[in-house]
Image: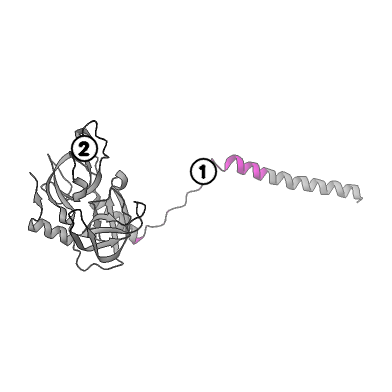
Amino acid sequence: MDGRLKRLIFTGFVFLLIAVAARTFVVDRSYSATAMRAIKARADITDYERTTIAIFDRVSPSVVQVADSPDERDSDEETAIKTGTGFVWDTAGHVVTNYHVVQDAKALGVKFASGDVRKASVVGVAPTYDLAVIRIENKGSLPPPITIGSSKGLKVGQAAFAIGSPFGLDQSLTSGIISALKRHIPTSSGHEVANVIQTDAAINPGNSGGPLLDSGGRLIGVNTAIFSPSGSSAGIGLAIPVDVVNRSMGQSVYVVVD
């Protein structure tokens, strides 16, 4: 075989390689962005995921968004409308939230997980603990009251879950752990609340008044404040312990609002 024939064969081989490579490139560029991909069957969800799903499914209907009704505000008033979270306390239509959520509100509206919105009014406040009770008007059919746990015996490291309306995004679930216990926070009344629960479950503006739950979906605290240089979650959320809330309700430390 002379050199000329060898060169022709080699050149043809090179062109063949280029053609194959070019075809692969063209196919990838032309079809990869639109072609259907094979779907891989999902593995079974974990026990932790089952727990989280069960908590949200059971508790979220009892968690409500609390907002100052814009329909009742003065047309020239430019003050931002406050929103927060609350939860159904009993079958009489009482909802527990933070005092700072309802303070100076013109008219309250409560939004349920179903999307139903109803008017509510403040019936009692406990500024000393940054707590308030509102009552739903024309309560009709209500979700079940939230299950009450105890903040006594909590352990640092155990799971914690928060449901609320961060930045107005209602029915948001976050999870984390109890980061510390026996914290202290001041309230607007000048009183300091002791034995406050610290959690790294994400809590943002709008979560105030919402429930902090244990892995059994029981109420262990009321989310109240965050420590953050930016105003958003920095992983340090604070909750009033449920034993304070329960004792306050039982001993009628709330100031009745006419």
Residue type marked 2: Ser
Residue 198 at x, y percent in the picture: 28, 62
Image quarter hosting the C terminus: top left
Tell me the residue at 57%/43% (across/down): 32
Q: Is residue 70 visible?
A: yes
> Which residues are the magenta region?
23-47
Determine whether the residue tagged by mark 1 lies in a helix, strand or loop: loop
Q: Secondary structure at mark 2?
A: loop
What residue is shown with label 1? 36
**Residue 100 placement (x, y as % from top left):** 21, 49
For residue 63, say whether it is visible: no
Q: Is residue 106 left or right of residue 207?
A: left
Viewer-proximal residue among 68 and 87: 68
Q: CA distance from mark 1 to mark 2?
A: 47 Å
Magenta span has 24?
yes
Closer to us: 113 or 83 = 83
Magenta: main secondary structure: loop
> Dot 2 corresponds to which residue?
69
Q: Residues within 10 Å of mark 2 (few under 14, many from 20)?
A: some
Which residue lies at the image location 30% right of the left edge and 61% below the top edge?
Answer: 199
* Mark seen at residue 17: none
> Residue 152: image x %, image y %?
19, 67
Residue 245 sits inside the magenta stretch: no
Residue 129: image quadrant is bottom left
Q: Percent position (x, y) of residue 25?
A: 65, 44
